[in-house]
C-alpha cells in the first residue's frame, strides 16, 4: 500500500473518531454552584488527543501489512504499552486508553511476526473443536470444586460472596433459559416474568401459610411452570421475531399486573419481610425465639451474619447444579432431542410424527420452572421483592448470557454470566467509564468469537462400539 | 401375488383461493409397490403429497389408508398424527434434515414416539430405568443397520448438514424409514443426484420395498428412476390426472406425450422422434 492510501485510511478513521468524540468528549456540562443551572465546559484538548491516538493506531495497524515494518512496530508498541503507565499525566483515563490501544497493536504485531495466525488458521476448525471439547470435559469439574471451596478461600470477602451469589443466580437463570432458547430455539424475551412469578409465589405462600422454604420452593416452581404453559399456548404458531414480541409483551404484562394489583402484590411497594430460609428449621438469627435453637447454637459457633450468606451461597449453588444436571440429562432423552430437532426444522419434526405442541409446551414449562426456583431463591435472599426487580432489562441480561455462551453449551453460560454480571462489578473503579469498558468487551467478543464463547455442541448420543461383528 | 390397496385417493381437490391446484384426482397406491406421480412443473404433485401428509388443513375428498396399522382417513387427521398413528412418512423436495444435529441423532429423533413411550414420557428416562435403556439400545441398532446400509457408519457423528448432497438425500430416506412407516412418500429423491448416486438410489428404493414390505409413493422428474423402478405411474397435468397405468402404458399414452412436449395441435409426433426421446430419457 502506498503512503497516500495509508494516510487517507488513517485520516478517515481519525475523522470518525473526531465525529464521535467532538460532541461526546468535547463538551461537559458542569453544575457550578452559585450560577443558574449548568455551564458547558469544553475539552477540545481531550478530543485532539483521542483523534491523534486513533490516527496513529490505525496507521500502525495498516503498516503491519508490510513485513518489514512488523518488528519495529511490535517493539515500539510494546515499549509504549509498558512505558506509558509510568508517566504521570493529568489524564489517567487517556493514559489507560493509550495503554490498551498500544497493547492491542503489540498483540496484533506479535501475532503476525511469529506467524501464529498461520498455525491457528491451518485447521482452525479442528483446533477449536478439540479445545472446547477439552474445556467441556475438564473445566466443568474444576469449576464445581472451585465453587464449593469458594466461601472458604482467603480472598473471599462478604462482598465477593454476595457477588458470587448474584452470579450463580444468573447462571441458574441462564441454564433455565437455555432450555427454551438454546435447545428448543424459542426466542423468549419475557423470561423474567417466570422469575417474578416464582418470587411472588414464594413470598405470598410463605407469608400467608407460614410454610417452610422447602415446601414453598417446589410450589413456586410449579406456579412458574404453569405460567410457562399459559404463555406457551398462544405462541405455539409463532416463530422468530413474532414470538419474541409476544414473549416481551407477556413479561411486561406480568410486571404491570404486579405493579397495579396492590391488594395482591403490594403494588409498587412490593412485599417486605419475606421469610428467610432456615437450616433444616434452625434459623440464622442472633436471638432465636424462646424454646428454639438457632443455627450457631446448634453447632456451638459464635453468631456471625456471614453464616446465612454462606448458607444462601450453597443453596443457590445446589439449585444451579440441579438445573445443570437436569438439563444435561434431559438433552440425552427423546424429549431433549425433540427440542433440538424442533429448533432445527419444525416441518420435518411434524413429518416424523413429533407432536410440536407438547414439545414446545414442555420446553416452556421446564424453562419457566427453573426461573420459578430462582425467583423463590431471590425472594428469600432479598427478604423484599418489588416489580422493579423484574424489568425487561433482566430478561435482556439473561438472554445475553445465553446468546453469549453460543447457545446450548453449559459451561459457556457460566463464563458468560461471570462476564456479564461480574465484569461490570469489577469495573466499578472506572466509574463513569464502566459501561464503556463493558461495551468494549462485548464488541471484542463479537469480533473474536462471533458464534459465542463456546460454540460447541456435543452429540447427545453415539453409536456404541460394535458388539460382535456388527454390520 | 395379489395386490392389496394401501392408499385410496378419491376425488381429492385442493383450492388456493381461485386456483385449483389439484382437481378431482382419484388413484390407488398398492402395498409393496412403488407408485410414481409424474407430471410437468406446477402440475400439483407436491400438493397431493402435502394433502396426504397433513400439511394443508382442508383438502376435499377422501384419503383412505388401509395399512398394517388399521384404517385411517388421512384428510381428518392432524399433520403429525398422520406420521405418528397412520404410519405415513415423507421426505421433502428441498432436503429437510436437522442440519446441526449429527447423522445418528437424525435417525434417533425419527424414533421419537417409540422412545418417548419407553422413557415413560421422560420420567423413566430421567431415572435411567432398564426399560428405557433397552429401548434406546434397540433404537441405536435400527439406526446402525440403516447407517451400515447407506455406508455412513463412519460419519455417524458428523453434523448432518456437512454430508455430501447425495448422502443427505439418502439419510433423509433412512430417517423417514426409521419411523417404521407403512407408506413412504418421497418428493423428488433423485433431484440433484449424479448418475451413479441415482443408480444407488434406485437400488435402495427397490430393496426397501421388497425387504420392508411397504408401499412407496414417489414424485420424480428423473425418468430413468421412474421408468426403472415404478410398478405403477400416475400422471398429473394442471392439477388433473391424465394417465394411470404401468410404465409401458404411460410411456405410450398420447396425452402424456402432449403434456410433456406441449400441445402440438393436430400434429402427431413421428414415431422415430418419440423413440429417440424415450432413449434420451426425457419422457
Image: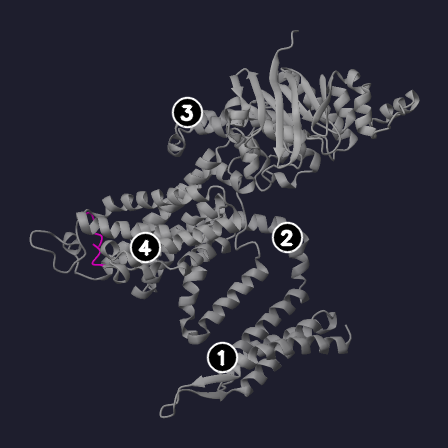
Q: Is residue A279 magenta?
A: yes
Are marks 3 and 1 in one subunit? no
Residue identified by numbered label 4: A257
* As drawn, B126 above or below A410: above
Question: Camera-side residue: B210 or A86?
Answer: B210
Q: Quick one: label 4 or label 1, which is nearer the N terminus?
A: 1
Task: Tell me the distance, in whole angstroms, between the alpha carbons under discs 4 and 1.
Answer: 45 Å
Q: Which residue lies furthest to the left in this view?
A: A290
Q: Residue furthest bottom?
A: A34
Question: Camera-side residue: B121 or B11?
Answer: B11
Residue at x 49% of width, y 85% of height:
A88
Residue identified by numbered label 2: A124
Q: Quick one: label 4 or label 2, which is nearer the N terminus?
A: 2
Image position, residue A353 (x, y; %):
52, 29
Are marks 2 and 3 in one subunit? no
Question: Disc 3 is attached to a residue of which chain?
Answer: B
Task: Tell me the distance, in whole angstroms, between the alpha carbons under discs 4 and 2.
Answer: 51 Å
Task: Tell me the distance, in whole angstroms, between the alpha carbons under discs 1 and 2.
Answer: 37 Å
Which one is in front in this view, the residue at disc 1 or the one at disc 2? Answer: 1
Residue identified by numbered label 1: A93
Task: Tell me the distance, in whole angstroms, between the alpha carbons under discs 4 and 3.
Answer: 46 Å
Mark 1 surroundings: few (<14), some (14-19) or many (≥20) residues within 10 A: few
Amino acid at each position: 500500500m502506498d503512503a497516500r492510501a495509508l494516510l487517507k485510511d488513517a485520516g478517515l478513521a481519525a475523522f470518525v473518531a473526531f465525529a464521535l468524540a467532538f460532541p461526546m468528549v468535547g463538551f461537559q456540562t458542569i453544575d457550578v454552584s452559585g450560577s443558574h443551572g449548568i455551564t458547558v465546559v469544553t475539552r477540545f484538548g481531550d478530543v485532539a488527543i483521542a483523534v491523534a491516538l486513533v490516527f496513529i493506531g490505525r496507521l500502525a495497524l495498516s503498516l503491519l501489512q508490510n513485513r518489514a515494518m512488523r518488528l519495529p512496530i511490535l517493539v515500539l508498541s510494546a515499549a509504549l504499552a509498558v512505558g506509558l503507565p509510568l508517566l504521570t499525566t493529568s489524564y489517567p483515563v487517556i493514559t489507560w486508553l493509550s495503554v490498551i490501544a498500544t497493547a492491542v497493536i503489540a498483540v496484533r504485531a506479535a501475532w503476525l511476526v511469529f506467524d501464529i495466525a498461520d498455525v491457528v488458521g491451518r485447521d482452525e476448525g479442528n483446533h477449536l473443536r478439540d479445545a472446547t471439547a477439552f474445556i467441556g470435559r475438564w473445566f466443568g469439574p474444576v469449576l464445581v470444586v472451585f465453587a464449593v471451596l469458594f466461601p472458604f478461600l482467603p480472598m473471599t470477602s462478604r462482598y465477593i460472596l454476595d457477588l458470587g451469589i448474584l452470579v450463580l443466580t444468573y447462571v441458574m437463570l441462564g441454564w433455565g433459559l437455555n432450555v427454551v432458547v438454546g435447545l428448543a430455539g424459542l426466542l423468549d424475551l419475557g423470561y423474567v416474568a417466570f422469575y417474578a412469578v416464582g418470587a411472588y409465589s414464594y413470598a405470598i405462600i410463605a407469608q400467608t401459610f407460614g410454610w417452610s422454604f422447602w415446601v414453598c420452593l417446589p410450589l413456586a416452581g410449579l406456579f412458574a411452570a404453569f405460567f410457562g404453559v399459559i404463555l406457551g399456548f398462544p405462541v405455539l404458531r409463532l416463530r422468530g421475531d413474532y414470538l419474541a414480541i409476544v414473549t416481551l409483551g407477556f413479561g411486561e404484562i406480568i410486571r404491570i399486573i404486579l405493579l397495579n394489583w396492590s391488594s395482591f402484590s403490594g403494588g409498587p411497594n412490593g412485599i417486605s419481610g419475606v421469610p428467610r430460609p432456615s437450616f433444616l428449621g434452625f434459623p440464622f438469627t442472633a436471638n432465636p425465639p424462646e424454646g428454639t435453637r438457632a443455627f450457631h447454637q446448634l453447632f456451638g459457633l459464635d453468631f456471625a451474619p456471614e453464616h446465612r450468606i454462606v448458607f444462601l451461597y450453597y443453596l443457590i449453588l445446589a439449585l444451579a447444579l440441579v438445573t445443570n444436571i437436569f438439563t444435561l440429562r434431559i438433552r440425552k432423552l427423546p424429549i431433549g432431542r425433540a427440542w433440538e430437532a424442533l429448533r432445527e426444522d419444525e416441518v420435518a419434526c411434524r413429518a416424523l410424527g413429533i407432536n410440536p405442541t407438547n414439545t414446545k409446551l414442555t420446553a416452556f414449562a421446564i424453562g419457566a420452572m427453573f426461573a420459578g426456583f430462582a425467583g423463590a431463591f431471590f425472594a428469600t435472599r432479598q427478604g423484599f421483592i418489588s416489580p422493579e426487580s423484574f424489568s425487561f432489562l433482566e430478561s435482556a441480561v439473561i438472554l445475553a448470557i445465553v446468546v453469549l455462551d453460543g447457545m446450548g453449551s453449559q459451561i459457556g453460560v457460566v463464563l458468560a454470566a461471570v462476564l456479564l454480571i461480574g465484569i461490570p462489578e469489577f469495573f466499578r473503579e472506572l466509574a463513569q467509564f464502566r459501561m464503556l469498558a463493558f461495551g468494549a468487551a462485548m464488541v471484542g467478543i463479537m469480533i473474536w468469537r462471533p458464534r459465542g464463547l463456546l460454540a460447541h455442541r456435543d452429540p447427545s448420543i453415539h453409536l456404541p462400539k460394535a458388539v460382535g461383528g456388527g454390520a | 401375488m395379489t395386490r392389496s390397496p394401501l392408499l385410496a385417493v378419491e376425488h381429492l381437490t385442493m383450492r388456493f383461493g381461485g386456483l385449483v391446484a389439484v382437481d378431482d384426482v382419484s388413484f390407488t397406491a398398492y402395498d409393496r409397490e412403488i407408485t410414481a406421480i409424474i407430471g410437468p412443473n406446477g402440475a400439483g404433485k407436491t400438493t397431493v403429497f402435502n394433502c396426504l401428509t397433513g400439511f394443508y388443513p382442508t383438502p376435499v375428498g377422501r384419503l383412505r389408508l388401509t395399512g398394517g396399522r388399521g384404517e385411517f382417513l388421512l384428510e381428518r387427521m392432524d399433520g403429525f398424527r398422520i406420521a405418528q398413528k397412520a404410519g405415513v412418512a415423507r421426505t421433502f423436495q428441498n432436503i429437510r434434515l436437522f442440519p446441526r444435529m449429527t447423522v445418528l441423532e437424525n435417525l434417533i429423533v425419527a424414533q421419537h414416539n417409540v422412545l418417548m413411550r419407553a422413557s415413560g414420557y421422560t420420567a423413566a428416562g430421567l431415572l435411567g430405568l432398564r426399560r428405557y435403556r433397552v429401548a434406546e439400545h434397540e433404537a441405536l441398532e435400527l439406526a446402525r443397520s440403516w447407517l451400515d446400509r447407506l455406508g455412513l457408519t463412519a460419519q455417524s457423528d458428523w453434523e448432518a448438514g456437512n454430508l455430501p448432497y447425495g448422502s443427505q438425500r439418502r439419510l433423509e430416506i433412512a430417517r423417514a424409514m426409521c419411523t417404521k412407516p407403512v407408506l413412504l412418500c418421497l418428493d423428488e429423491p433423485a433431484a440433484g443426484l449424479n448418475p451413479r448416486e441415482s443408480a444407488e438410489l434406485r437400488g435402495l428404493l427397490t430393496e426397501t420395498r421388497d425387504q420392508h414390505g411397504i408401499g412407496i409413493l414417489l414424485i420424480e422428474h428423473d425418468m430413468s428412476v421412474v421408468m426403472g423402478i415404478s410398478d405403477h405411474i400416475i400422471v398429473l397435468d394442471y392439477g388433473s390426472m391424465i394417465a394411470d397405468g404401468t410404465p409401458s402404458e404411460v410411456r405410450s399414452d398420447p396425452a402424456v406425450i402432449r403434456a410433456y412436449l406441449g400441445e402440438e395441435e393436430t400434429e402427431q409426433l413421428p414415431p422415430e422422434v418419440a423413440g429417440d426421446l424415450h432413449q434420451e430419457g426425457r419422457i
